[in-house]
Amino acid sequence: QKEVEQNSGPLSVPEGAIASLNCTYSDRGSQSFFWYRQYSGKSPELIMFIYSNGDKEDGRFTAQLNKASQYVSLLIRDSQPSDSATYLCAVNKGYGGATNKLIFGTGTLLAVQP
Amino acid sequence: DTEVTQTPKHLVMGMTNKKSLKCEQHMGHRAMYWYKQKAKKPPELMFVYSYEKLSINESVPSRFSPECPNSSLLNLHLHALQPEDSALYLCASSPLFGETQYFGPGTRLLVL
């Protein structure tokens, strides 16, 4: 079992719809969770981070964390063609030392259709 | 300001060349990272520097040699690379090791 799992997609949604991106992780002790957006040929760009159970909203983006289910998601409301990119979920175990490194999922490719 | 800069943007080198990649941040971050990313794969951690000391080396071949001259600067020295080392090399920084990481734009490296 991979430490961080994402559906590779592509996830295709029409413009204006809600895009829902999902991520599961295997280590129950994981502490912090990140979503990065990466356009083709570019570097990852931080979208959201979340540490506590529940929802965290920032503009059109909402991150949701459920530690009991070991599940983190990213909702994008009013999806735009410019949101088309690969979304990387990353998890930090936070135990200190070498376990503080980010573990990335393989990413989900989102395609927003005009 | 969450800017990490990297130079050069693109680099083509032969297998016998020696070159260096440079990364700079002026956010006062005390942790800096080198990642390698191949096409359609997630970033793969290579090295971590925390307070200018090498904290993690992910068993990277010695043809890659990192250096952290000061708290704002991180270099990656390249020597005798192989074609399979062609990739996007990403630098990142975070306030402290383990905190939110911010990536630079990357250097796209092609080894011929």
Image (tube, rainbow, N blue to C red):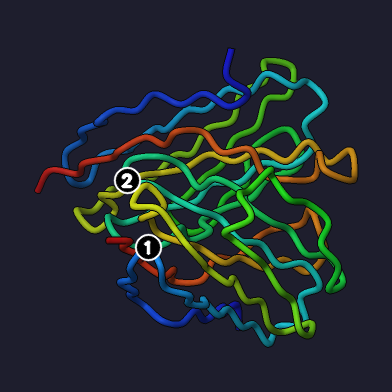
Q: Which residue is mark 1?
A: B15
Q: Relative to B22, is A87 above or below? A: above
- Answer left or right for A52 relative to B2: right
User: What is the total number of numbered labels drawn onto the structure image?
Assistant: 2
Residue A102 occupies quadrant: top right
- Residue B11 in percent (x, y) is at 34, 74
In the rendered image of this protein, does residue A18 appear above or below residue B13? above
Q: Residue furthest front?
A: B16
Distance between the alpha carbons at the discs numbered 1 and 2? 21 Å
In the picture, measured across the screen, residue B85 lies left or right of residue B40, that is right
Q: Residues within 10 Å of mark 1 (few under 14, many from 20)?
A: few
For the point 42% across and 73% down, which residue is it?
Answer: B17
Residue type of the residue flagged with mark 2? Ala
Mark 1 and mark 2, same subunit?
yes
The residue furthest left is: A114
Image quarter of the N terminus of chain A: top right
Q: Position of residue B29 (x, y in %)?
A: 76, 75
Residue B62's place in the image compared with A55, above or below, is: below
Foreground pick, B3 / B46? B46
Of callouts 1 and 2, which one flags the residue occurring earlier in the amino acid sequence? 1
Q: Residue at x 67, y 67 (%)?
A: B66
Q: Position of residue A24 (x, y in %)?
A: 57, 22
The residue sitting at the top extreme is A1
Look at mark 2 in the image and give the residue it sits on.
B39
Residue located 73% across and 58% down the image: B48
Residue at x-position 52% and y-position 77%? B20
Letter of the chain that mark 1 sits on in the rendering? B
Whether residues under marks 1 and 2 lie with C-beta atoms below 8 angstroms apart, the answer is no
Nearer the observer, disc 1 or disc 2?
1
Q: Amino acid at mark 1?
A: Met
Q: x, y percentage for residue B59?
A: 68, 43
Callout 2 secondary element: loop
